[in-house]
Image (spheres, rainbow, N blue to C red):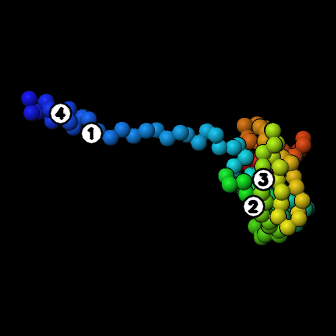
Amino acid sequence: MKKLFLFFALASTVAFTSCSKDDDDTDVIIGTWISEASITPDGGSTTTYEDTWVFNTDLTGEYAETTNEEVDFETTFTWMKSEDSYIVIYADDEGTDTFTVGELLGSTTLMEGDNILAVKE
């Protein structure tokens, strides 16, 4: 009888872990978006241009423009969702942009109007 009592006592002390809710409600824009282009003139060396947007969960972000991996320009921004678009307000009076998120050939794209600006990394 003692063994049965011990068994039930131990069984009742088993800790149950609850599954935390998945981050399914994280906004699709959160993450790093990259636009890259390379130009190689006849007989010249290749120049690579890259624009990077990083959208954070706290509604802030960073934007940078680089040429051959050297930073030409960088700034921070805040962002907000407005219906199906995202409004980005750059620091230092650099203006605003309105983006949407699309899909092209299996890649998630950052769009400005009908133009693809970047692909999600």
Which amino acid, mark 4?
Phe
Query: Which SS class for mark 1?
Result: loop
> What residue is shown with label 1?
13
Q: Quadrant of residue 44?
A: bottom right
Query: Which SS class for mark 2?
Result: strand
Which amino acid, mark 3?
Trp
Q: Give the residue at x 29% y 39%.
A: 14
> What residue is shown with label 2?
62
Residue 79 image label: 3
Q: Quadrant of the N terminus?
A: top left
State how far apart marks 1 and 3 are (Cα). 47 Å
Query: Which SS class for mark 3?
Result: strand
Query: Which SS class for mark 4?
Result: helix
Tell me, yes or no, if residue 120 can be seen here.
Answer: yes
State how far apart marks 3 and 2 are (Cα). 10 Å
Q: Earlier in the sequence, mark 1 or mark 3?
A: 1
Q: Nearer the viewer, mark 1 or mark 3?
A: 1
Q: Earlier in the sequence, mark 2 or mark 1?
A: 1
